[in-house]
Image (spheres, rainbow, N blue to C red):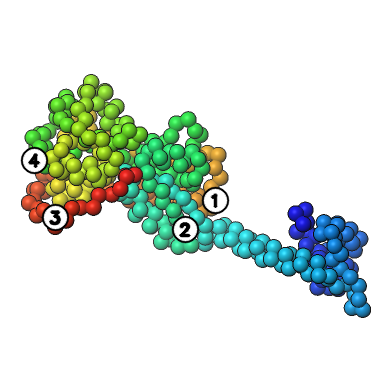
Amino acid sequence: MRNATVKQLRLLSAAARGGSFAAAAEACHVTPPAVTMQMHQLEAEAGLPLFERDRRGFVLTAAGREVLSAAERIEAVLSDCAAGIAALKSLAGGRVTVGVVSTAKYFAPQMLAAFARSHPGIDIEIVIGNRQDTIAAFESGRLDVAIMGRPPEGVEVESALMGNHPQVVIAPPDHPLAKRRAISPRHIAGETLLMREKGSGTRLLAERFLARHGIKPRIGMEIGSNETIKQAVMAGLGIAFISAHTIAAEIADGRLAVLDIAGLPEIRHWFVVRLAAKRLMPAARALRDFLVSEGRHFLPDVTDFRHREKSTKPRQRKPPAHQPKMPRGGD
């Protein structure tokens, strides 16, 4: 029955309801000879008679009843499909998969939550990873849209600017350079640097900044998590390049300091990206448009770091009763 058509199944259903091919022709707006031809083709496909005559007219055989049952199930599936498509068109339903580079996880959930509140019927899946992982998922077509710092190269994309993305160097509040102003980049040449893993966008930016100033870094650790880097800096293990959007809380309560290095912060940008060849469903397009138009309002305000550092004294903190739970890889 693989070659049976929906048209043939609908004609069979109409003939079963009306008791004749003529009734089926009238119900389906075709000629009686057309119905006869289609039913003969369907019987040939089944390899058994589908109708027989009795005093009431045409009635279904056992094989005909099997085909009718299948036709009814197919109609139900098509009806559900039509309802689902209608929901997608109206944004009453749908699913969107969003890729988020790990540095953006500090604000992306708030953006997506705001969108979800206004579109409660849309399911949102968030896939968080470093730049390399996110690009791989993006290029495979798994992601509808992605939030990242720099659009990938080597693949045709459509990208839209969402907002500024400042990069800074952080240190413990009691670091000798923490109170100095207009620090020359060469003063960090002898510092131990804590670096993100290779493939991270933050790592690439740090390497370019250091190379531009002729600095060969002394790397103390490679760490695959912004959270772990912050904890390591607070513990005095070194200084680190990091996105300013990941440290607002720690700066506000005096656990970290931003070093006033000449040439920093380096302002990069956040983008909303999609594959140019990928057709977005209405739900995904609505989310993409929301991120482009409203996303910047959810970015942490880091324009007054220096003011906050001057006005906020580092406070003594009791050691935690238990070791903080570090996030697992992928940050």
Q: The N terminus appears in which quarter of the rendering?
A: bottom right
Residue at image position (71%, 67%) is: 72
Do labels 1 and 3 touch, CB within 8 Å?
no
Placement of the C terminus among the 4 image quadrants: top left
In front: label 4 or label 3: 3
Label 2 amino acid? Asp
Q: Label 3 crowding class (10 Å Cα cut-off): few <14, some 14-19, many 20+?
A: few
Amino acid at circle 4:
Asp
The answer to which of marks 1 and 4 sits earlier in the sequence is 4
Can you tell which mark lies on residue 281? 1
* Dot 3 amino acid type: Pro
Which circle's residue, 1 or 2, is located before the other in the chain?
2
Give the mark toward the camera: 1 or 2: 2
The residue under label 3 is 320
Q: Which residue is mark 4?
A: 174
Q: How far, Cα to Cα, is label 4 from label 2? A: 46 Å
Residue shown at 8%/35% (left/top)? 176
